[in-house]
Image: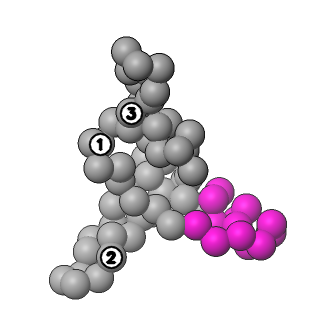
Amino acid sequence: EEPFVMVAENILGQPKRYKGFSIDVLDALAKILGFKYEMYQVADGKYGSPQANGSWNGLIGELIGK
């Protein structure tokens, strides 16, 4: 159900909080499978696209680099 992810209101000095259907699913999976996660926006704000040198930028680039 939309919206899939939204930024919840941020109390001054607190980290951003996210909510929405995708977050609910991720929370349920984390609880069932026993993992922790951290949400943040990548520095360049992009999903990811291939670069001329064969690397990727954005979210995909961060995932590949892990």
Residue type at the position of mark 1: Gly
Looking at the rendering, in which quadrant would you find the N terminus? top right
Disc 3 designates what residue?
A: 57
Report how far apart the C-alphas of labels 1 and 3 lie in the structure: 10 Å
- Residue 32 magenta-highlighted: yes
Residue type at the position of mark 3: Asn
Q: Where does the magenta region start and end?
A: 25-37
In the rendered structure, the answer to whether residue 32 lies left or right of residue 54 reads right
Residue type at the position of mark 2: Pro
Nearest to viewer (mark 3 / mark 2): 3
- Foreground of the two, 61 or 9: 61
- Foreground of the two, 7 or 38: 38
Q: Secondary structure at mark 2?
A: loop
In the image, residue 6 above or below residue 28: above
Is residue 49 visible in the rendered image? The answer is yes
At label 3, counting other C-alpha atoms closer than 10 Å, the crowd grade (few under 14, some 14-19, many 20 or more) is some
Disc 2 designates what residue?
A: 15
Q: Main secondary structure of the magenta part?
A: helix
Residue beneath the point at 35% across and 49% down: 42
Which label was assigned to residue 45? 1
- Contact check, label 1 and label 3, Cβ < 8 Å: no
At label 2, counting other C-alpha atoms closer than 10 Å, the crowd grade (few under 14, some 14-19, many 20 or more) is few
Q: Secondary structure at mark 1?
A: loop
Q: Earlier in the sequence, mark 3 or mark 2?
A: 2
In the rendered image, residue 36, in percent from the top left (x then y), is placed at 64, 71
Q: Earlier in the sequence, mark 1 or mark 3?
A: 1
- Contact check, label 3 and label 2, Cβ < 8 Å: no
Report how far apart the C-alphas of labels 2 and 1 lie in the structure: 18 Å
